[in-house]
Every structure is written in structure tokens, then in C-alpha cells.
Image (spheres, rainbow, N blue to C red):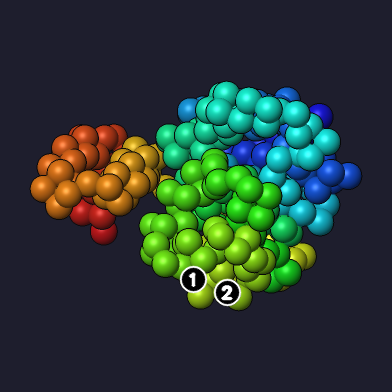
Amino acid sequence: MSVELDVVDRTATITINRPERMNALDEPTRVSLAELIRSCGSDPEVGAVVITGAGRAFCAGQDLAAIHELDDAHDTVARTYNPIAEAIATASVPVIAAVNGAAVGAGMGIALACDVVLMSESASLACVFGTVGLVPDTGTSWQLVRSVGYLRAFELAASGRRVGADEALALGLASELVAPEALLPRARELAADLARGPRLAQQLTKRLLRQAQVSSLAETLAEEAVSQGAAALDGEHLRRRAAFLAR
């Protein structure tokens, strides 16, 4: 299996499992990855998702052994890359990237699309599209410019240079750095904590924060009011409010 799924204690761990190819993505892998994220993200028995890679890489992006897939790059990106980023963004649960090694090209896009980015201290990011005459995809341009601003985003995209874990943290491209051997346990620990949280409130918060990046203040205020109305009527809020008042 090029993508593996393991569900324990309401945490789904999705592993890109092509270590001999540095977890590079061919079409079957991309399709499977998007399907699993979409399935786990809507499963009421799953409270959080962790995405990682097998072996020494997180994901090397497009599999060059399947470079013919870029003969019609518009179709390939729209049909098989975009759904991965969309599945992460629309998942009703938090999605955590456990970046265990190099995250290159679309691999970087997948990592940055997640709600939390944990990086091994030995991991790195690289937006290498420009070095081969291509442009960022898998949402990489959207994430980069909102995380680091236009000037730095352009430099990273145009140069394709490697960004080590320390720099990624300083730039706001990583949430936390973790020792290599502790990365997956830490990701699962965090996922378990999030999975115990109020699902609807987390889902609405995720949507609010993502929309706020492109919405006006007036639009955001209106959406906050609607979302708060829904959250306040949710059974999880009512249970937590009763428990708080009973203390």
C-alpha cells in the first residue's frame, strides 16, 4: 500500500508509504491520500488526523518516474493534487503534519496545508517548483504568502532553497520542533488531546481562521456571530457549561 492508515484512540495516522521513492507522489498515491484524508476528516469516530511519511522523507513531491503525468499538468493538478489540499482544509477535525524529513514541492504544500505543523529537528522544507520551470501548486502559494508575506514567499518560491527546521519555526512555517525519535509520539499525543476537544467548536474555529485570511472584518464578524450561535447550541458546549457551573 502506497498510503497506510492506522486508527488508535480516535486518532487516524495516515502514512505516505513509498520510502524507496522518498514518498514521492504518483497518481494512485495522490488519489489514495486525498480519499483517506477526506474519509477520516468526516468520520465521527475520528477526532484528529496525523499525516507523516515512511522512512527518511516526509514527501518528495511529484514522482519523477511518473513525470509523464505533467504532460497535461492542468488536469493532473486540478484532479489529483488540489483535492489533497482541499481535503485537509475542509476536514471537520484538526489535521497535524508530522514532518519527519524532507518536504519538497507538493510535499511542502501538503505539510503547510495542515492545521498544525510539527517538524523533526532534522527535517526541511523546499519549494523547488521554480528550479524546474514550474509554479507552486497544492496550495503552496496560498499558504506561503499568508505565512511569510509576499517578499519572503517569492524568494523561497523562486530560489527553491532548503529551509531547515529552525528557520521554518522562525518564519512561522512550523508550529513546533521535535527530536526525530519523539516526532510521531508527540504528534499522536497532540492529536489525542485535540480529539478530546469539542468537535463542532474546533470545526467552526478552523473554518473561521481559514476564511479570515481572505475575508473583510465585517465578513469575519458576521461569520463569528453565526458560528457562535451554532456552537452555543451544541450539546458539547451545554455539557461543558453545566460542568463549569457545577464546580
- Res. 57 visible in picture: yes
Q: Residue at x 29, y 35 (%)?
A: 235
Left or right relative to 129: residue 246 = left
Q: Is residue 241 left or right of residue 40?
A: left
Q: Nearer the viewer, residue 163 or 246?
A: 163
Judge left or right: residue 30 versus residue 88: right
Q: Is residue 204 left or right of residue 164?
A: left
- Image quadrant in which the C terminus is located: bottom left
Residue 71 x/y as whole percent:
68, 27
Marker disc for residue 171: 1
> Is 51 in front, or is 109?
109
Q: Label 1 near label 2: C-beta < 8 Å?
A: yes
Tag shown at residue 154: none
Q: Nearer the viewer, residue 75 or 185?
A: 75
Location of mark 2 (residue): 167
Q: Amino acid at mark 2?
A: Glu
Residue 186, picture quadrant: bottom right
Is residue 138 depicted above or below 243 in this figure? above
How many angstroms separate mark 2 from mark 1 (CA)? 6 Å
Q: What amino acid type is highlighted by mark number 1?
A: Leu
Q: Secondary structure at mark 2?
A: helix
Q: Give the quarter of the image for residue 189.
A: bottom right
Q: Residue at x 18, y 41 (%)?
A: 223
Mark 2 burial class by Cα count in 10 Å: few <14, some 14-19, many 20+: some
**Total numbered badges shown on the rendered structure:** 2
Q: Image point 57% across, 74% down: which residue? A: 167
